[in-house]
Structure formats: C-alpha cells, structure tokens
Amino acid sequence: MTDETLRLDDMTWTEVEAALEDGTRTAVVAVGSIEQHGPHLPLRMDTIAGEAVTERIAAKLGDALAAPPIQPGCSGHHMSFPGTITIPPETLMDLIESYCRSLDEHGFECIALVPTHGGNFGPVNTVAPELARELDATIVTLADLEENMALMNEGMAEAGVDYEEPSIHAGAAETAVVLAVEEGLVRTDALEPGAEGEISAARMINGGFEAVTENGVLGDPREGTAEAGEAIVERMASAYADQIEAARDLD
C-alpha cells in the first residue's frame, strides 16, 4: 500500500474493496474537535494532529487505512471563545458507534480510536466496551490522556526543546505539531504565552477555559518548533502502532 492510498476518504469504493481483498484489515480513526486554540492556531488543530498521527500509524502498520476524522467533539469548556463548536458526549458516542458499525460491516477486522482532544477521551472509553462486545471487529482505544501528553513532551525533548508542559493546549507542543504538518496555518505574529504550570481541573470545569487562561493558551507556544512537531507525530504514531499490533495479535 502506498502513501497515496492511506486516506480512506480519498479512495473510491472500488479501491477500498480492493484494499480489503488484498489484506487491509485495520481502520484508524482520529476523534478531533473544532475549538479555540489561542490566537495563533486554527480551530481544527486537534483534527490536524489526529490526521497526521493516524496516517502515520496506517503507514507503519502497512495493512491499514486512516479513516476520516470525527469532529466536532466535546468542547463545552471552550465555548466562551468564538468559533468553537461542541456536541454532547452522547452525540459523540453515537457518531463513534455509527463509524465503527459502518467500518465493521465493510469487513475491517480492527478499528483503532485515537482521540486528540482531552474532552473526547471519556466518551471514547465509555462507548468502546459496548462496541467491542457487539461488533466482529477488534476495537482498540488509544485513549489514555496522561500517556498522550507524555508522548508529546517526550517528542519535544527528543527534538532538543527544553520545555515541558504539565497541561497541553495551544502551547509549545501543539504549535510544534501544526508547524510540522501545516506550517502556514500558524499565525506567527500572534504567538503569545498563556497560563503556565498546573491548572485546576475543577476550576476549568466549573468556570470554563476562560477561568484559567484569558487567551485560550496553556504554556508558551513560542517554544514550539517544526522539528519538535515531527518528533511528536513520530513518537505518538510509533507507540500507538505498537499497541494496535499487540491488540491484533491477541485475536
């Protein structure tokens, strides 16, 4: 399978049919969002990251396709920032279920769910067990938020960036990913630091994201580099591809 055929939605139905007949067995699904990411990153930042990681995972597996990302996500805590679009957790879980049922019906033997927005991790982990019981396909969830952030910080360190973020949103790590994937979407003239250090989850939930940061940023996006973004995508894709392979081997 070549890089040109890794995106499911870029293919025709006959090409998908042929890929399945030739041994493609896994669909990798990003679960992204449409929400504010400070004054310098586009609203679809989480989706951009999800697409980059899932395509890289599919390439590493060699017998997989990157399905279209699911968006919007559960972003109610960002709604004070214009442009954010949010859906209830129940709606997101319904969308995930419909995606998985469709892919299962077409013959994909494994479906991997990769949330790239913190508010989506809970719904993914909630709906996955029921899907695993009901569908023929193996359902793999890459939905450990602490692991997700650790992999991003590890990628930053690997690229020589001496800056670690305890909470990741629109700061150095996410800015780095967009610089690596779609550099032109970063408003470099609008880079500005936001809230530093640990944030109170209770304060954020009760008061919204504006209660912890005025500009929607956590950390300092000026620390991000394209090299760090590439290292982040590679580290995440490698770790997740290994976990998918391990889950498939159990079946």
Image (cartoon, grey):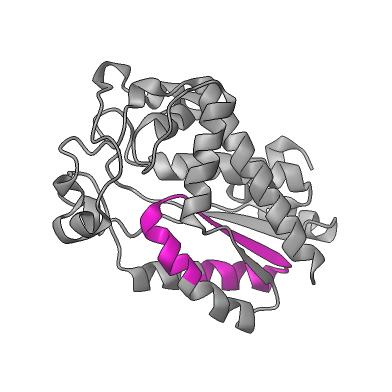
> Does residue 228 lie above or below 66 as drawn?
above
59 horizontally vs 103: left or right: right
Answer whether residue 117 is magenta in the image. Answer: yes
**Secondary structure mostly seen in the magenta stretch:** helix
> Does residue 114 lie above or below 173 as drawn?
below
Q: Position of residue 224 (x, y in %)?
A: 42, 24
Q: Which residues are magenta?
A: 97-125
35 horizontally vs 9: left or right: left
Q: Nearer the viewer, residue 237 or 87?
A: 237
Picture quarter containing residue 4?
Answer: top right
Q: Report whether residue 230 is seen.
A: no
Q: Position of residue 184 (x, y in %)?
A: 41, 21
Which residue is painted at 57% across and 36% down in the image? 233
Which residue is painted at 28% across and 58% down in the image? 86
Which residue is painted at 21% across and 54% down in the image? 204
Answer whether residue 214 is magenta in the image. Answer: no
Q: Report whether residue 126 is seen.
A: yes
Q: Position of residue 89 (x, y in %)?
A: 35, 69
86 horizontally vs 46: left or right: left
